[in-house]
Image (cartoon, helix red, strand yellow):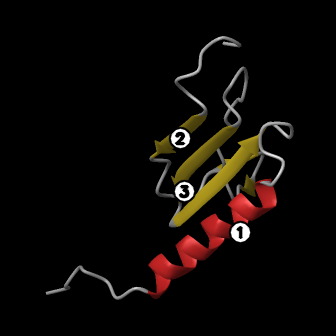
Amino acid sequence: MRRQRLVNLFVSNLVGPSVPLYFAGARILELFQVGVVQGNVGLSVGVLSYAGQLNIDLVADAVLVPDLEIVAEGFAAAVDELRAAPSARTDP
């Protein structure tokens, strides 16, 4: 992994359960997938749907991605733009 140069980012998008899950009788409020960063891979982006939510997580190597807060702010701004955009879907 230390010698590979072709990959520096992992992105994963998984479909999670559409209904809430429970653990020991308590409802699980949020679910996230957590990626692994190693070698030249400095950033992992995980997207997971769960019970009507779309949860995004960022995992970064602090040396390779020292400005993770800026990346997270960019993701938040992009999600806000998508939320504000008119829907292309038309309901019958």
In front: mark 3 or mark 1?
1
Q: Residue flagged by tag 3: what amino acid is it?
A: Tyr
Q: Position of residue 89 (x, y in %)?
A: 23, 79
Give the mark nearer the N terminus: 1 vs 2: 2
The mark found on residue 73 in the picture is 1
Q: Look at mark 3 in the image and give the residue it sits on.
A: 50
Mark 1, Cα crowd under 10 Å, few <14 / some 14-19 / many 20+, is few
Image position of 87 with respect to 37: above or below: below
What is the distance, in whole Å, between disc 3 and disc 1 at their CAs? 22 Å
Residue drawn at (54%, 50%) of the image:
48
Question: Disc 1 on helix, strand or loop?
Answer: helix
What is the distance, in whole Å, between disc 2 and disc 3 at their CAs? 18 Å
Q: Position of residue 70 (x, y in %)?
A: 75, 63
Between 6 and 78, the one nearer to me in the picture: 6
The C terminus lies in which quarter of the figure?
bottom left
Residue drawn at (70%, 55%) of the image:
28
Question: Taking 21 as reference, is 14 left or right?
Answer: left
